Image (tube, rainbow, N blue to C red):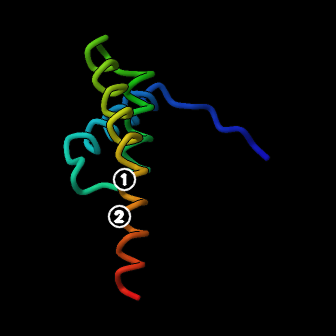
């Protein structure tokens, strides 16, 4: 197994992709949004960007149990 060196553009590329996911949050899965939030929370350029990413992560995590309950309810109603 060969370890390839990271280019200096790696963090900038990942941050740019994370920003694109967050900018179009309605069209991405919660998993991808969580990943983007984690990247921005760690590598965001400003303290505000990092704090916003952490807040969005809390929101996405908070709504997850509601979605699960709604799916279960819809499954029971279909029977």
Residue for badge 2: 70
The kind of secondary structure element at disc 2 is: helix
What residue sits 36% from the left and 57% below the top?
67
Q: Position of residue 22 (x, y in %)?
A: 26, 40
The one of 38 and 19 positioned closer to us in this rendering: 38
- Residue at (41% x, 78% y) in the render: 75
Badge 2 crowding class, 10 Å Cα cut-off, few under 14, some 14 to 19, many 20 or more, is few
Would you say 3 lies left or right of 70 here? right
- The local crowd at label 1, few if under 14, some if 14 to 19, many if 20 or more residues have their Cα within 10 Å, is few
Please say if the residues under marks 2 and 1 sit with CB atoms less than 8 Å apart.
Answer: yes
Residue 9 picture location, percent across and down: 42, 29
Q: Is residue 55 above or below residue 13?
A: above
- Whether residue 6 sits left or right of residue 63 in the image: it is right
Q: Residue 41: horizontal and vertical position, in percent?
A: 40, 24
Q: Which residue is mark 1?
A: 66
User: What residue lies at 35% left-to-right and 80% top-to-bottom?
Assistant: 77
In the displayed structure, would residue 68 be above or below residue 11? below
Q: Where's residue 45, x and y in %?
A: 31, 16
């Amino acid at each position: 197994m060969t370890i390839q060196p990271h280019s200096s553009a790696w963090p900038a590329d990942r941050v740019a992709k994370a920003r694109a996911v967050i900018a179009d949050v309605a069209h991405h899965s919660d998993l991808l949004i969580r990943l983007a939030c984690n990247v921005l929370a760690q590598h965001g350029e400003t303290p505000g960007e990092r704090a916003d990413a952490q807040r969005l992560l809390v929101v996405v995590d908070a709504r997850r149990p509601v979605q699960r309950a709604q799916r279960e309810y819809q499954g029971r109603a279909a029977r």
